[in-house]
């Protein structure tokens, strides 16, 4: 068993294909197939189901995938430790990000400083829903991720805090109110945003005995804003997730405070800060500094 085999196995699993993995690695598809077959023969179990268009990880493969990523992560950390000792900043940092809060409001400023300080570190960013980032952290697919706090499964670093606000069609009757309550949302079509908000609103609705009439479940903020503006429903979103030019870009959407206030904390999470790679630790330190400067 070699690191190369484990790297190819993890990449085939991530990209769900032999061809895609071969292109990413810059090798032939036959070389990828040979590496997987050799690993399967050594372990005595099939790891990948070869299908016409995609490759699917077997049940045994799923159990071994986390171990493979752990081994690869430790190997990368060792390489970075040696590079740091020699005065070099090299290696790969994998970041998981969700929604505009992380991808547009927090990460650009952090990365701008990070790249100036550590130009030799390659950064790979995977974007998805907040639940995706949590799973990527558990699966060791990413080294550090932007998440909604708290989460006791990880070591976390708070970065920002905001609150949820109600978004309504500008001509909706509720838009005449100064603030929106949970009970106001009980009998109107509701658009459930699944990027950093759903997990916060569910216990709020439950505590008030309200079951929202969910008409749509949508992960993209721009789509939600467009549908609210078109009168397709109302929703609740975090302030940091909204565009800075809301009033100009979406005049047909009314924004109202949500009462009682529901606050949200966003930060960075990783499995174990003590075992984090030098690149991950450097990113966390940079994030803390940048956010503190902007406060």
Image (tube, rainbow, N blue to C red):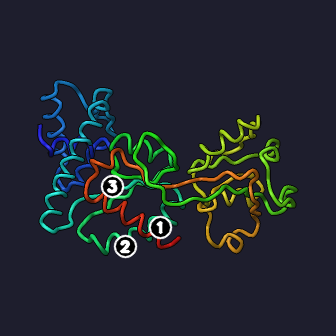
The residue pinned by badge 3 equals 94
Q: Is residue 15 visible?
A: no
Mark 2 secondary-structure assignment: helix
Tag 3 secondary structure: strand
Q: Who is closer to the viewer here, 69 or 292?
A: 292
Q: CA distance from mark 3 to mark 1?
A: 20 Å
Picture coordinates of residue 107, whole percent (x, y): 44, 65
Q: Residue at x 14, y 39 (%)?
A: 34
Q: Nearer the viewer, residue 64 or 226?
A: 64
Q: CA distance from mark 1 to mark 2?
A: 11 Å
Could you tell which of marks 3 and 1 lies nearer the N-terminus? 3
Q: Which residue is mark 2?
A: 113
Q: Callout 1: 10 Å neighbours few (<14), some, many (20+)?
A: some
Residue on which disc 1 sits: 291
Residue 57 location in percent, x, y? 32, 34
Among numbered discs 1 and 2, the one appearing first in the sequence = 2
- CB of mark 2 within 8 Å of CB of mark 3? no
Q: Quadrant of residue 178?
A: bottom right
Circle 1 sits in a helix, a strand or a loop, which is it?
helix
Q: CA distance from mark 2 to mark 3?
A: 17 Å
**Label 2 vs 3, first from the N-terminus:** 3
Bin the neighbour count of mark 2 within 10 Å (Cα to Cα): few under 14, some 14-19, many 20 and up: some
- Disc 3 residue crowd, few under 14, some 14–19, many 20+, Cα 10 Å: some
């Amino acid at each position: 068993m070699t690191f190369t085999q484990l790297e190819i196995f993890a990449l085939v699993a991530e990209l769900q294909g032999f061809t895609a993995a071969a292109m990413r690695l810059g090798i032939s598809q036959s070389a990828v197939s040979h590496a997987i077959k050799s690993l399967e023969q050594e372990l005595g179990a099939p790891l990948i189901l070869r299908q016409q268009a995609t490759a699917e990880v077997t049940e045994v493969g799923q159990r071994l995938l986390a171990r493979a990523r752990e081994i690869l992560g430790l190997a990368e950390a060792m390489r970075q430790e040696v590079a740091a000792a020699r005065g070099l900043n090299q290696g790969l940092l994998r970041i998981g990000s969700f929604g505009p809060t992380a991808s547009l409001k927090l990460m650009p400023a952090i990365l701008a400083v990070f790249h100036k300080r550590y130009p030799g570190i390659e950064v790979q960013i995977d974007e998805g829903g907040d639940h995706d980032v949590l799973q990527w952290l558990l699966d060791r697919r990413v080294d550090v991720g932007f998440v909604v706090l708290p989460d006791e499964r990880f070591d976390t670093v708070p970065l920002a805090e905001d609150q949820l606000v109600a978004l309504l069609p500008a001509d909706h009757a509720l838009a005449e109110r100064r603030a929106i309550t949970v009970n106001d949302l009980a009998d109107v079509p509701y658009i459930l945003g699944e990027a950093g908000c759903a997990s916060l609103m569910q216990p709020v609705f439950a505590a008030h005995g309200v079951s929202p009439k969910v008409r749509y479940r949508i992960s993209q903020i721009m789509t939600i804003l467009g549908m609210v503006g078109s009168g397709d429903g109302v929703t609740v979103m975090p302030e940091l997730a909204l565009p800075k030019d809301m009033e100009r870009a979406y005049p047909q959407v009314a924004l109202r405070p949500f009462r009682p206030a529901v606050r949200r904390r966003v930060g960075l999470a990783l499995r174990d800060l003590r075992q984090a790679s030098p690149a991950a630790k450097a990113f966390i330190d940079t994030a803390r500094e940048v956010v503190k400067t902007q406060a």
